[in-house]
Amino acid sequence: MNFLSLFVLIPVLMLGGLFLSGTMKQIRTICATGASLLLLLAVTLTVMYLGDRHAGHTAEMLYTASAVWYTPLNIHYSVGVDGISVAMLLLSSIIVFTGIFTSWKMEVFPKEYFLWFCLLSIGVFGFFISTDLFTMFMLYEIALIPMYLLIGVWGTGKKEYAAMKLTLMLMGGSALLLIGILGIYYSSGGNTMNILEIARLSIPVALQRWFFPLTFIGFGVLGALFPFHTWSPDGHASAPTAVSMLHAGVLMKLGGYGCFRVAICLMPEAAKELSWIFILLTGISVIYGAYSAIVQTDLKYINAYSSVSHCGLVLFAILMLNQTAITGAVMQMLSHGLMTALFFALIGMIYGRTHTRDIREMGGLMKVIPFLGVCYVIAGLASLGLPGLSGFVAEMTVFVGSFQEADLFHRIMTIVACTSIVITAVYILRVVGKLLYGSIVDSHHLELTDAVWYERFAVIVLILAIAGIGLAPLWISDMIRESLGSINLNF
Amino acid sequence: MEYTLLILLLPMLTFLLLGLFGMKLRPAIAGGIGTLSLALTTLLAYTTAGYYFSSPRIGGVLPKLLPINFEWLRFTDALHIDLGILLDPISVMMLVVITTVSLMVHIYSLGYMKGERGFQRYYAFLSLFTFSMLGLVVAPNIFQMYIFWELVGVSSYLLIGFYYTRPAAIAASKKAFIVTRFADLGFLLGILLLSYFTETFSFEALTSGNSAVFSAAAGVTFLGASVMSWALALIFIGGAGKSAMFPLHIWLPDAMEGPTPVSALIHAATMVVAGVFLVARLFPLYVLAAPEVLVGIGYVGAFTSLYAAIVACVQTDIKRVLAFSTISQIGFMMVALGVSGIGGHEGLGYMASMFHLFTHAMFKALLFLGAGAIIHTIGSNEMSRMGGLRKYMPYTHITFLVACLAIAGIPPLSGFFSKDEILAATFAFAPQMGVFMSFTAGLTAFYMFRLYYNIFWGIPAKFEHTPHEAPKTMIIPLMILALITLFAGFIPFGHFVSSNGQPYTIHLDRTVAICSVAIALIAISIATFFYKSSCDIPDRLVNMYPRLHRAACHRFYIDEFYLFITKRIIFRCISHPIAWFDRHVIDGTLNGIASMTQRFSYAIRGFQSGQIQQYAFVFLLGTLLIVLLMVLI
């Protein structure tokens, strides 16, 4: 058996273990062990991958394996990774790991909660290791469905509405996606679902023009593509902490990853032809999300709109169709995933103490909860692109990459996207100023206690990852860049 | 020269140490660690300077050394960010300036910040700032400079907002960060544009004086200006933001909400001159590729210096006066660069600008630290609460006077030499410019002595408790800086730093020197007459020109204009409508689709009633209908 399958097997085993477990202690042990194993596995994979690349393995994907499971359509369970998937697996394992620790004190139906959580992880990890279109799609759906229950049951506020909205919109995207995938399968004419093989075949351009927008929008809905992003603010606001983390941190990356892997790589001609429409839309996302975030008062809404802006930048960079910009896009996925998970974790922790997320009802929290306060500032600085943290390297790679496209349209859109760094600073500093500085507005907040060990642990792991990428970005950016080189972007 | 890495590492490690574990240390120990580490850094910087300036010259030019350089991030095959250390005359000179002032501020703060909540945090931030600023000046490529440029911005933000429970401090820190961020957008776009055409970030390649580096940009124009002009003008916007050039100066006066030693270090001596340093760093490129932008920089500098000098004449908060004075003096440095050329006498402006940067850093830090000592004992920034302090604070008084004389340009203090060179350079450029700048220099002398007399002479205010001289930790830095201010003018500066690297001997232009000293003396006499003892002329003048006075007090309403833009335009007219649009139009459409689906379902759900009779009835009706149709057709 290929060792990549461990990424799916471990969550499956966790699922089984949880099913049999009874006490909170058992649940925690299973989750913590499983998540640690996943993290360890991802780190090992990264090291191995870098080593093998260094040793001169030049195949597009390493550690490939394949087993057919539905012969009529030639659907395989096929796996394999390149630098981009390795980066995404690393991200997912960090988020799952820290997500488990932030939900350490889950009291309502803990067993069921973690069961769904594991199912979601199966989908996420499976998606990133798959190289078979249909299997990818299936795992994508597996990742989406638990979200409905996790928000609907364990959420807060208008949770039923939010869960329904999120699921329906994403399912709408999936419907388009399914058509797109079947279209690719039939029009490529190779009787194969394997994306590596399809990439070698050529789909007639006339058909690409149909299937490219379908797949791009299909995945784009999950990547918060304007105007299909409105599930994000409501969904995130209602979701429980760890689910928000996982959703914004990893699930939204499924969108970006899919857009690149399926829409762009398989249909490059149409991508080149139609990219301008989507550049326009994603350019709007970047600015629009940032401006919307300025006037929000709910911490989660602010962060959700900020995610629209940052994820917009991911799709924007992918559409630039050059190596540097796409490297930047993947780095931005990684960076945004870690950053936003950190944000949502902190917001959850603050909400757990103050029982409000409205920044007008809070103030001066730095004095009472300094640890969470300082971490919030660090998250904010990462978000506004402070050098030394991951946001900076990602954004700069995106900007430099986008700037290589010299025609006026690309130039203008790039400059417009660049202005987001100023607007981001405005809304981040506004929140930090209101929430943490100044004097305490609610006297109940004087008795707040600072983070406890599992909260600290989760937050510190995330910050270390953010700082790690921000301080030493070369290895990871080279890993992604080289993979892009071998994909042979024939634009 | 690898040990130069320690110059950067020491402050960074100190920051990490104090930042992570500072709260567990006693304040005195944390302050001690910070100061000691910086003293070591200073020592290293001096060693480097000594070694560097005595190293053998190649063709009369000091070599450019690159002791450390490694790749940090790769964009394309040609474009990659390297991190490294570049030693050349201006970066080594800046190392000396930064470490000296920073060390003085570290020592001074031991006394000034004593007993403050967050003392450890303060020292951590000071180390972070020093690290970032040192990284900025030694940057061998423009992207490293941008990286540290952002880092100094953040350290400045953190230090301005040090008293984070004070609303004014929060607002000021936010303002400083956002205004400079806006300017940095220009810087970033400039870098992108420049690097796209030159395919390099390296200063070495950009400033080699070889026009081949930007040959790709030849003939590319946009809106009538060459693309190199655009790039360099955009980069200058970044510099103008950090160096508080009009109209991006609005953050600096507010930044005075930070602790006073911070104002001395960041907002007087080091960070605010980063813009000047940036232009100086790219100077050969400006001269070669965009001389018209350089002239523009000169005009911006000239206007800013006059504007700030006028505003400084009417401010009543002593730190605000000093802040506007700083803006005005940086304007002088910019003018000097703007009027300069390269080589020999042509390059006088460049040398003068760097010289003034050096002397200004010392005497302005001295002024701020002196002001800090006064604020420390009085507990207020307002001039009206002071007066007659010379008796209570003799050391502060003397050192403050030295700095005032230096900034006014009285020989033989250091400010005289550097300012005189600037004036000579402007006269050589255009006599009108020279006259303009001389007038501003006169105003400088006037408002500085207005400040001086109002603090130390004039009518003693009623003090809540008798003012006392500052503790030793604060006095010693004042004295050291005063000594430097007294004698720095005799440094053969042109020997070390000049536009083309060739040693340049400073000749005093006698006419310019005599004129400028005369103007300064006249201005000082007027100030003496007005403010030494009570005199009603200032009030009469105010009554004569009430409009002008009010406008100057309000800094000519520039802040109000920005407030209008941000509050009214960005918040009211952009953000709110967008947020509304998102919730009501886009989300509304989606909800509309959902409810339409629902309504449609309700409408057709009668079809699936589950009643056999209804089904049978419809079935029969349908059959009949078909039969009828078949019969009819």
Image (cartoon, helix red, strand yellow):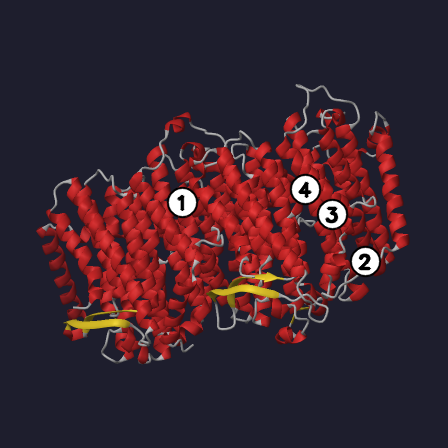
Q: Is residue B564 above or below residue A412?
A: above
Say what amino acid the circle numbered 4 marks: Ala
* Disc number for residue B365: 4
Q: Chain of mark 4?
A: B
Q: Spatial distance from mark 2 to mark 4, Cα to Cα?
A: 25 Å
A396 lies left or right of B186: left
User: Do discs 4 and 1 share a chain?
Assistant: no
Amino acid type assigned to the residue bearing label 2 in the image? Ile
Q: Nearer the viewer, mark 2 or mark 3?
A: 2
Earlier sequence position, callout 2 versus callout 4:
4
Say what secondary structure mark 1 lies in.
helix
Give the residue number, with chain letter if any, for mark 2.
Answer: B506
Between tags 4 and 1, which lies in front? Answer: 4
Pick the quarter of the image with the N terminus of chain B.
bottom right
**Mark 2 vs mark 4: in front:** 2
Q: Looking at the rendered structure, which numbered label has been put on residue B329? A: 3
Amino acid residing under circle 1: Tyr
Q: Quadrant of the C terminus of chain B?
A: bottom left
Taking the spot 70% from the left edge, 34% from the top edge, the residue there is: B318
**Residue identified by numbered label 1:** A301
> Disc 4 to disc 1, how far (Cα)?
44 Å
Residue B622, image x, y percentages: 15, 61
